[in-house]
Image: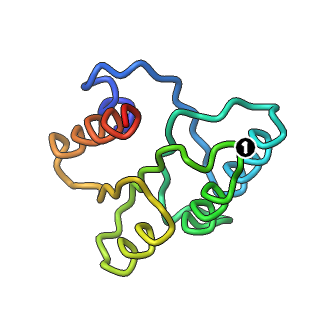
Amino acid sequence: MVREALDHHALDYDLTVYSDGEQLLEAIEQVERHELACPDAVLLDLNLPKQNGAVLLRRLRESDVCGRLPVIIVTSSDAARDRALAAELGATAYFCKPADFDEYLKLGALVAGAVES
């Protein structure tokens, strides 16, 4: 659905998907060692296995190489405490996964706006 949302807004992208937080943590370390390019944006779920999204967002914000890149939280949680934590840790935006497909397509517009800023 993420690909469809990005395609719907005609965004030019290379989407890399990490299945758990440890994989993303390793990618962050590769970016810091200049073995991997810093992405234009990160779409981050708070509920990742092995390392949760809050830990990863904190780690991204501490990075000298890519600490300022847009990070959009994409999660099923609409809890006020999760929204507050994401804001406190420096998330660029928060997108609660909707049940409606048309609403999900709005993620593309959110990504476009974050990358352009």
Q: Position of residue 49 (x, y in %)?
A: 61, 63
**Residue in the image at 78% along x and 43% along y:** 32
Colour mapping: rainbow
Q: Is residue 6 above or below residue 44?
A: above
Left-right relation of 10 to 68: left
Counting the numbered discs, the total is: 1
Which is more toward the observer, 53 or 97? Answer: 53
Position of the C terminus, as image quadrant, is: top left
**Residue 53 shown left or right of residue 76 in the figure:** right
Pick whichever, 27 or 76, lies toward us.
27
Q: Residue furthest bottom?
A: 81
Q: Amino acid at mark 1?
A: Ala
Q: Quadrant of residue 85?
A: bottom left
- At horizontal 68% and vertical 65% (from top left) the residue drawn is 50
Instruction: Please identify the quadrant where the N terminus is shown.
Output: top left
Q: Residue at x 29, y 70 (%)?
A: 78
Residue located at (37% from left, 40% from top):
114
Q: Nearer the viewer, residue 90 or 106?
A: 90
From the image, tell me which residue sits under label 1.
27
Q: Secondary structure at mark 1?
A: helix
Give the quadrant of residue 77: bottom left
Task: Residue 25: give x, y in percent of width and height.
Answer: 71, 53
Q: Position of residue 37 (x, y in %)?
A: 69, 30
Q: Is residue 44 left or right of residue 25?
A: left
Vertical comparison of 4 with 90: above or below: above
Few, some or many C-alpha atoms within 10 Å of disc 1 (few <14, some 14-19, many ≥20)?
Answer: some
| Image coords of residue 69 (percent x, y) | 53, 43
Front residue of this view, candidates 94 and 99? 94
